[in-house]
Image (tube, rainbow, N blue to C red):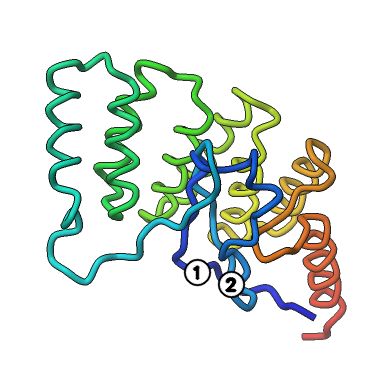
Amino acid sequence: MAEASDPGSDYVKKSTMFGVALICLAIGFFVGVIFSIYRSGPDIPRQASAPPVQPDPIAGRSQELDALIRETSQNPENVVAWTDLGNLYFDTNQFDKAIWAYQKSLELQPDNPNVLTDMGVMYRRKGQPEEAVKAFDKAISVDPKHEVSRFNKGIVLLHDLNKPQEAIRSWEALLKVNPFAMAPGGKSVDELVTIYKKSFKQQQQTPE
């Protein structure tokens, strides 16, 4: 039986997510029993790049970066450009810059649950899980059916804030939105909840 483990460093963007995603979420969430957190998006999930070995994290994407910086400078009301800039910083693990760009995007379009979700992932990677949960909660308040934010919230509550019961409640709320919600690796969220409930019950019954 699978056991709970700390989350890995892989993140998936929701900007490429839950249309096709709930069918093909088998992309890299359960590697063994290692958990990830999602990133947002319109197509299929993809993993953000691991921290680069080379000194320049933007290597190979400098032209794209320059174009986005130029566009946001010349047209600061271009919400898409700010979001794309945040996504580029997301992909290259530049947490502070990603959060800054996402905040600029949200100043123009405050109720974008995907951007809020991506910003939450960046807060979590930066080591600020409380801020991550706030971002996920905001995404949920904007779109109560936003599945990725609910799933991510459970991951952060479980692994970063040590609040397993709240994590389970977050996933149970997700199941009310979509009873067939799947986690990557082929496990259903319902199965995930069952595993953790059983694990926690066993821990409570184990004498110290």
> In this image, 203 relative to 85: left or right?
right
C-beta proximity under 8 Å, tags 2 and 1: yes
Q: Could you tell me which residue is drawn at 59 percent across and 49 percent down?
A: 152
Task: Give the residue type at disc 2.
Answer: Ile
Task: Give the residue type at disc 1.
Answer: Gly
- Is disc 2 placed on a helix, strand or loop? loop
Q: Is residue 205 above or below residue 78?
A: below
Q: Is residue 151 above or below residue 208?
A: above
Q: Is residue 203 above or below residue 187?
A: below
Image quadrant holding the C terminus, namely bottom right
Q: Could you tell me which residue is drawn at 64 percent across and 55 percent down?
A: 25
Task: Write down the residue under mark 1.
Answer: 8
Nearer-N-terminus badge (2/1): 1
Q: Crowding at label 1, few (<14), some or many (≥20) Cα neighbours within 10 Å?
A: some
Quick one: which residue is furthest to the bottom in this view? 208
- Is disc 1 placed on a helix, strand or loop? strand
Give how far across and how far down residue 90 sits, in percent: 34, 48
Label at residue 34: 2
**For this rendering, which residue is in front, 109 or 180?**
180
Residue 164 in which image quadrant: bottom right
Give how far across and how far down residue 50 sits, in percent: 35, 65
Q: CA distance from mark 2 to mark 1?
A: 6 Å
Q: Crowding at label 2, few (<14), some or many (≥20) Cα neighbours within 10 Å?
A: some
Q: Could you tell me which residue is drawn at 30 percent across and 42 percent down?
A: 98
> In this image, 200 relative to 76: left or right?
right
> In this image, 162 relative to 129: left or right?
right
Give how far across and how far down residue 133 sits, in percent: 54, 43
